[in-house]
Amino acid sequence: MVTQYAADTEHWDAAVATGLVRVGVGVLLLTQRDMAIKFAGGSPSDRLLRGLFTFWGVRDLALGVGALAATRPSADVPKQITYQGVADTIDTAIVAGLVAQRRLTRVRGYGATAIAAGTALSGFAMAWRLRRA
């Protein structure tokens, strides 16, 4: 059974907003990868970080396109936003692990961890709110 969410303006707005942000972040991570790695406290010459940031860029593009596609009638916007929350939860654990391995500096790495955790929490809260609307 498919719930009709996307016809609702609040659901449509949430899908477009999160979709555009994800597409923008994905493009940024792919085109400015070295800058993003430095911002997170890592070394742009670290092959693991380069691969991981490239993966995150492609993944965020896919999540953004999925969220934008959820604007269609009978699409499940809260489910798409929950996917984003799950991805950000996994990112939180990965970034914390990179700090523990000293691939990211403590201050910047923990800052990136906090951003990922906050984004995950806000995604889950938004999905919960949209389901109740």
Image: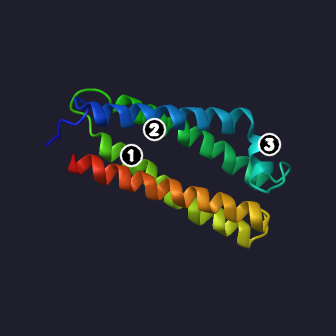
The amino acid beneath tag 1 is: Ile
Compare marks 3 and 1 and give the one earlier in the sequence: 3
Residue 92, x across and y down, in percent: 57, 62
The amino acid beneath tag 3 is: Asp
In the picture, measured across the screen, residue 84 lies left or right of residue 55, that is left
- Residue at 45 percent of width and 48 percent of height: 84
- Residue at 27 percent of width and 30 percent of height: 9
Q: CA distance from mark 3 to mark 2?
A: 24 Å
Quadrant of the drawing holding the N terminus: top left
Q: What crowding class fits label 2: few (fewer than 14 Cα within 10 Å), some (14-19), or many (20 or more)?
A: many
Mark 2 element type: helix
Is 2 or 12 nearer to us in this picture?
12
Q: Which residue is mark 2?
A: 18
In the picture, measured across the screen, residue 120 lies left or right of residue 36, that is left
Q: What crowding class fits label 3: few (fewer than 14 Cα within 10 Å), some (14-19), or many (20 or more)?
A: some
Q: Which residue is mark 1?
A: 81
Residue 101, x across and y down, in percent: 75, 71
Compare marks 1 and 2 and give the one earlier in the sequence: 2
- Residue at 17 percent of width and 40 percent of height: 2
Q: Mark on residue 34? A: 3
Mark 3 element type: helix
Residue 17, x across and y down, in percent: 44, 34
Looking at this view, name the residue that lies furthest to the bottom.
100
